[in-house]
Amino acid sequence: MALLAEAVAAHQAGQLDAAEALYRRTLQHQAGQPDALHFLGVLCHQRNRSEEGIRLIRLALRATPQHADAHNNLGNIHKESGELVEAEACYRRALACQPQHHDALSNLALVLEAQERPQEAFEAFAELLEQAPQLGRAHYLMGMHRCSHVKEIEDVEQAVVCFRNALRCDSAHKRARDALGIGLYMLDRQQEAIGVYREWLACEPDDPVPRHMLAACGGEAPPPRADDAYVRHVFNGFAESFDEQLLEKLNYRAPQILVAALAGVLEAPQAALDVLDAGCGTGLCGPLIRPHARRLVGVDLSDGMLRKARLRGGYDELIEAELASWLRQDSMVWDIVLSSDTLNYFGELIPVLSAAHAALRPGGWLAFTLERLEGDEDRMELSASGRYRHARAYLERALLASGFAGASITSESLRKEMGKPVAGWVVLARKAGANPI
Ligand SMILES: C[S@@+](CC[C@H](N)C(=O)[O-])C[C@H]1O[C@@H](n2cnc3c(N)ncnc32)[C@H](O)[C@@H]1O
């Protein structure tokens, strides 16, 4: 057993090579030892060998079928592999073994939500709150659930109460603090939102999130684009936190809409083009655009997002870099620069659009989405979501100033936020020149 304890300690310390070797030695001494099989399964999944992980945990469960943690961890592997039905079954088995298993219950609620079964998800979140009223995460998840299904303003008010309760239980819960600020801003309680971010900044002066969000609430002048530290912080956290993805990415359609619009102006796919996915994130655009690409490269600031894109596969290269600076390094190298839901982290568009223009070959296409700011004025703003919104007049001027004449700009709903569709722009802009594709 000493060997197993050593393996677990190495695993907890993030020493995955050492931990794997120790688990395997444990299994040589004690074939079929269920804890070693179970933890080795979790480790295999962490090392992108999910199928092996599933097989090992199933073996462990054959020996100890009442092991709630093993069922829960098996569910997590299925959940993170997008196998929601299997994940749900595992969480239900965990709860059958141990009805008060809080992780399994919150995971069950999340996969119900992700399967668009909001009433059942609500009941599971409510049960979790009843079981664990002192658990900050339980209040936070209920708040996020309410935000995902806003029908009337009272839903946002109730969400704000949930986020306050989350912070009362766990004052270090940063996501609850962030969500509280956004909720207050949505309720037009701007001064309270500013107060939340100022208080947060006073405790953590180096944290890029409250600094950015203070500007988003009008408490400070907005930067020309979201700074690198903010983008990395938000998206690294997001990549690791699958739960928030499931809750926040509901009805997110930007990649599908953008690639469909682009396909409308391209020839039938012949795998002949050099394509850059600019701000590729977890790689949702990759499989959609791949049939057109001879070479597909993704660029992103967040190594967490890039890790997920690597797992998804389909890219020839994935590069960690700031987009506008990286684009400036080479000229006339891409047939397509595609950017889904990324340029809304840029307020001033001319620097990045000009860089994309220079990087495209003549006749090449720049395709991107933005969030839409209503009105005829030539302006953009940093909104309470932390993303920028651009008015059509601003966008048209920025495109022209960057060298793109005659771009197509259409309005589409790209995602839902607080239960409401968020209006966006889908832009197809072509670099003039003699090399039509
Ligand atoms: C909302 S995600 C969209 C990801 C992907 N394109 C999609 O549609 O699923 C925005 C991505 O843009 C990246 N990003 C934002 N600003 C960036 C910048 N200045 N340089 C590089 N990547 C950036 C973020 O790291 C994040 O992965």
Image (cartoon, rainbow, N blue to C red):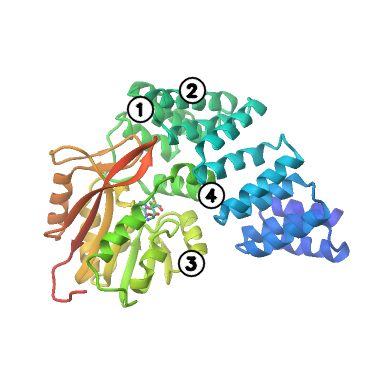
Disc 3 secondary structure class:
loop
Query: 329 above or below 394?
Result: below
Q: Residues within 10 Å of mark 3 (few under 14, many from 20)?
A: some
Q: CA distance from mark 4 to mark 1?
A: 26 Å
Q: CA distance from mark 2 to mark 3?
A: 41 Å
Q: CA distance from mark 4 to mark 2?
A: 26 Å
Q: CA distance from mark 3 to mark 4?
A: 18 Å
Asked whether the beta carbons under mark 3 and mark 4 sit within 8 Å of each other, the answer is: no
* Cβ of mark 2 under 8 A from ligand 1: no
Kind of residue sitting beneath label 4? Glu
Q: Quadrant of the C terminus?
A: bottom left
Residue 70 location (% of width, % of height): 73, 50
- Residue at the spot x=68%, y=59% of the render? 54
Q: CA distance from mark 2 to mark 1?
A: 14 Å
Q: Residues within 10 Å of mark 2 (few under 14, many from 20)?
A: some
Query: 349 above or below 99?
Result: below
Residue position marked by numbered label 3 in the rendering: 313
Mark 4 or mark 2: which comes first in sequence? Answer: 2
Disc 1 secondary structure class:
helix
Taking 285 as reference, is 101 left or right? right
Residue position marked by numbered label 4 in the rendering: 240
Residue 60 location (% of width, % of height): 78, 56
Taking 8 as reference, is 167 left or right? left
Of marks 4 and 2, the one in the foreground? 2
Q: Residues within 10 Å of mark 4 (few under 14, many from 20)?
A: some
Residue 212 location (% of width, % of height): 36, 38
Kind of residue sitting beneath label 1? Tyr
318, 83: nearer the viewer: 83
Taking 170 as reference, is 272 left or right? left
